[in-house]
Structure formats: structure tokens, C-alpha cells
Amino acid sequence: MAELFVLGGPMMWPLLVCSVLTIAIIVERLVTLRSIHLQADRFLDDVRDAVKRRKITEALAICDRTPSPLAVMVRAGLSRHEQGRDAVRQAIEDTGAREIPRLERYLAALGTIAHVAPLLGLLGTSLGLIRCFHALQLKTALLQPVGPADLAPGVWQALFTTTAGLAIAIPAVLAYQYFVRRVHEHVWELQRAAGDLLQWLAGDGAT
């Protein structure tokens, strides 16, 4: 593997950085978004039960124990329940606007890698072809025959960097699209929870 890396030439280094970042972002987002999803339903059930029993302090404690954007948003609304429905709605909207970027964290970087990796591979291909023509020029200038061994390093570089760039870009694109869809689902969940909270508070005379 190390030999193939060397054959790929200097562009393999930025491609290596892209591959490491891609793996790190995918793993981090999978763990984070999955954790948020698993907590959501139980969290909302617990908060609803507490609000129905008019135990706002208990509901706030549940929010404090749940590390998620949904809990932060619900807590902001609950903390304003004595100020009326409009204050609750405004607190939810303001907090939601701050928490949504947390769901989108690192996705811009992942999308950038998906676009840049093939370009880095293409640049490596161009450098490989330049290497081939340079070898050809040197042999011709010395009136020496040109054999496959003279062109092989440049061809290796051209093919391997293209392959590496695509191998990084394809999973990055797929992961980006998947995470964007998941974020949209979580945003919808935040909106639904906001509406539910307003109904729970209004139904029990808390707002």
C-alpha cells in the first residue's frame, strides 16, 4: 500500500488528508445524529407527562439531562412559560435558529471534499502526463529509445490519483446527501416538538 501511495506522486498527500477528514466527519455525524434520534421520542414523552402534571421544574430537569438541540429548544420554551404564549414561541424560534447549525456541523466541509477530491485527482493525472512527456522528451533529446519503463511512473501517477480522488468523492457525496436528509428530518422534528409544546402548555393553562 505504501508503494502505491508513493507511485501516486505528491498529490496523494492532499488526497490522504481528504480521506481522513471524510472518514472522521462521517463517523462523527453518524454517532451524533443517531444519538439525537434515539433520545427524541422518549424525551418528548417524559416532557409531555411532566407538563401535563404541571411539573414544569421537572420538565426543565429532563431537558437538562438530555444533551440535544431538541432539549435545548424545549427548555428555552419552558423557561418562558410564565410570560405567555408569544414569549414561549419567540424563545423556541430563537433557540431553534441557533441549534439547527449544530445539526449541520461539518456538512459544508464534507460537501467541499466531495467536490475537491476529484479535482485533486485530475491535477495528479495532469502531473502524471507531464511526467510522461518529460521522460519522453529527455529520451528523445538523448537519441535513446523510449520503453514502457520510462512512461510507467507517469502513467501510474495519472491513473492512481484519479482513482484515489473518485474513491474519496463517491462516498463523500453519498454521505453528504444522507446527512442532509437526516438534518431535514431533525428540523421537522424540532418544528413538530415546538407545536406540541405550545399545545401542552396551553392545554394545561401554563401559558
Image: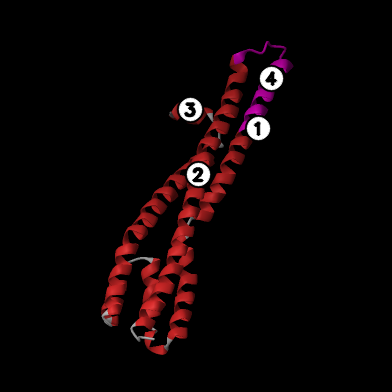
- Report how far apart the C-alphas of labels 4 and 2 lie in the structure: 40 Å
- Report how far apart the C-alphas of labels 4 and 3 lie in the structure: 23 Å
Q: Amino acid at mark 1?
A: Ser
Is the C terminus in the top left, top right, bottom left or bottom right quadrant?
bottom left
Residue underneath mark 1: 126
- Report how far apart the C-alphas of labels 3 and 2 lie in the structure: 26 Å
Rendered image quadrant of residue 163:
top right
- Report how far apart the C-alphas of labels 1 and 3 lie in the structure: 18 Å
* Element on which disc 3 rests: helix
Residue at x-position 44% and y-position 50%: 25
145 is within the stretch colored magenta: yes
Q: Amino acid at mark 4?
A: Leu
* Element on which disc 2 rests: helix
Disc on the earlier residue, 3 or 2:
3
Q: Is residue 66 visible?
A: no
Q: At which x and y percent is residue 70? A: 39, 68
Q: Are marks 1 and 4 in contact (CB under 8 Å)?
A: no
Q: At which x and y percent is residue 133? A: 69, 24
